[in-house]
Amino acid sequence: MMPWQWFTISTFLWAALIFALRLLNMSLDTLRVIAVVRGNKLAAWSFGFFQVLLFLLIFSWVYNDLNNLINVFAFCAGLATGSIMGIWLEEKLSLGFTELHIVSRGYGESIAHSLRLAGYAVTEEAGRGKAGTVTLLHCSIPQAKTKKIVSQVNEIDPHAFITAEKTRIISGGYWK
């Protein structure tokens, strides 16, 4: 294909299809990884099956005509954009649980009381930090509630040190 032949409506529509399918492909890949991390075997299998099926289809189209730089570019751009889309999708789905670790100097009891009133289980520990006595609070919450609870904690103690990590429920405990 000569360079001036690259710029047809058909060429751009084909490239747009490759881009869109690659975007979907990478979003499925993100969902597959989330399912694997969460231990959801059926979802991981399903997402993986369709992700690879799409990949093989799209890759064969691009591989059969590597001289078509527009399709190669669309394939690469779909992967890059799909990675970002996957991060956004994971944030919006807010699947799973988050373990909040809160360190507060002087407001630990108030924070724990507020969280308990909201229906969350909180474990309190006494500790000593650089500037003296602190309260360490541990609270497992649905990931979708993380921003709300961090905001709630910051209203009580704007200087609280808060970290979060994703977690899985193994057994026991109290869950709202």
Image (cartoon, rainbow, N blue to C red):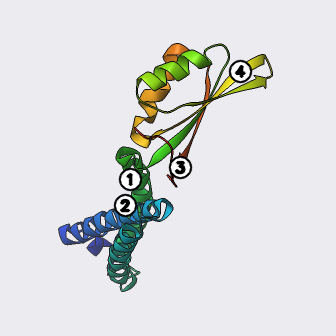
Residue 50 in which image quadrant: bottom left
Answer yes or no: do the residues labelled 1 and 2 have beta carbons within 8 Å? yes
- Say which label, 4 or 3, has the lower sequence index: 4
Q: Position of residue 19 (x, y in %)?
A: 32, 65
- Estimate the spatial distance between the alpha carbons at disc 1 and disc 3, rounded to whole Å: 23 Å
| Residue drawn at 55 percent across, 15 percent down | 110
Label 3 sits on what residue type?
Thr
Q: What SS does tag 2 mark?
A: helix
Residue 1 in which image quadrant: bottom left
Give me the disc on residue 85: 1
Q: What SS does tag 1 mark?
A: helix
Residue carrying label 2:
27
Query: In this rendering, does residue 140 appear at all?
Result: yes
- Estimate the spatial distance between the alpha carbons at disc 3 and disc 2, rounded to whole Å: 22 Å
Q: What SS does tag 3 mark?
A: strand
Q: Position of residue 94 (x, y in %)?
A: 39, 46
| Image position of 132 (left or right of 152) | right
